[in-house]
Structure formats: C-alpha cells, structure tokens
Image (spheres, rainbow, N blue to C red):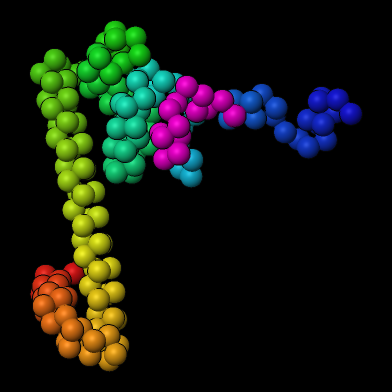
Amino acid sequence: MDLLHLKQLLNVDVSLTHKKGSLLDGICPEAVEMLKDQHFAANLGSVLRKMKPTRQVECVELMLTANDLTVAYAEALLAATPPHLLVSERRPRKPSGVTAEQMVKMEHETGNLQGQLKLVENSCGQDVLLVLARGYLDKRLDDKAVFRFLSQRQPDMLAAFEDIIQTVALDGK
C-alpha cells in the first residue's frame, strides 16, 4: 500500500504531520523539553529559531511563567532580545507602533522579570526544602526510641532539630 492510499484510508493530511514533526527543529533541547506538554502556535518555533539557545530557554521560561505561548508574545520577546543573543546578530524588524524608548523599557523589564523569576525559583526551592526537612525531623522525633537516643547521647543535636521544627512552624511554612 502506498502513502496516498494510506492517507486516504486514514483520512490524514501527511503534510500537516510533517509540519508538526518539524515544529521544534532548530530549538535547543532544554526549550523543547519545557514545551513538550504545552499547546502553542505552529509559528512559535520560527520565532524562537532566531535566538541563540540560552535566549530560547529564557523566553520559553518567561512565556510559561506568563502562561502566554503566543507568537505575538514571542515576537515581543524577540524584539527585546539584545543582538548578541540573536542567531544573526541583526536586530529583528521592530514591531509597528513601538517607540525606541518603549523598546528600551521592555528590554529592561524583561531583564528584571528574569531576575525575579530566578529569585522566586530559589526561594521556593528553599521553602520546599525547609518544609520537607521539618516533616522528616518531626516524624523522626515522634519515634520514642530516636527521641530517647538523641536526648541521652546527642542533646545538642536534639535541641537543634527541635529549633528547626519550631522555626519552620513559626514561619507558617
């Protein structure tokens, strides 16, 4: 059976399948991984391909954080991308209706957003770790044998563990 008959039998547009298969060609693996379970416009890849891999990852992170995987948002991020992070190092066409002052402001705000994103990631990671540590220590100290052992042989460590549990509980975490 040839491809034409298979196409007719399955009622599948083969060209569409080929297009979907190449949507993320030229996109770095890290960005592809972040996009793999997301719904996004077919033209998103063509915008991201104009950026170097590190910028692709930054833009996908920003788009996911904003829950906005549209081509328009990607093009705005592309327009705000410094030339050294572009594949051709040639500035993309400036979006119509955007002044040079607005572009500078958008580049600045993009940088601030990326910094804030990293701070939130780090902060959340530490908060989760504290909550997990508190839960683990709380369970261990609920075990009478562990509590008795620590109180008899490692009272300083027991006091430190209890301080951690109390401090995390007071923080409301």
Query: Looking at the rendering, which quadrant does residue 16 occupy?
Result: top right
Query: Looking at the rendering, which quadrant does residue 100 occupy?
Result: top left
Query: Looking at the rendering, which quadrant does residue 156 occupy?
Result: bottom left
| Rendering coords of residue 160 (x, y %) | 12, 74
Classify 91 as above or below 6. Answer: above
Q: Is residue 31 magenta?
A: yes
| Residue located 70% across and 29% down the image | 13
| Rendering coords of residue 9 (x, y %) | 83, 35
Quadrant, the N terminus: top right
Which residue occupies the extreme right position in the image? 1
Kindly tell me whether residue 113 is visible in this rendering.
yes
Kindly tell me whether residue 166 is visible in this rendering.
no
| Residue located 21% across and 61% down the image | 127
Range covered by the magenta-colored residues: 21-34
* In the displayed structure image, the side of residue 159 where residue 134 appears, left or right: right
* In the displayed structure image, the side of residue 142 where residue 60 appears, left or right: right
* In the displayed structure image, the side of residue 153 where residue 17 appears, left or right: right
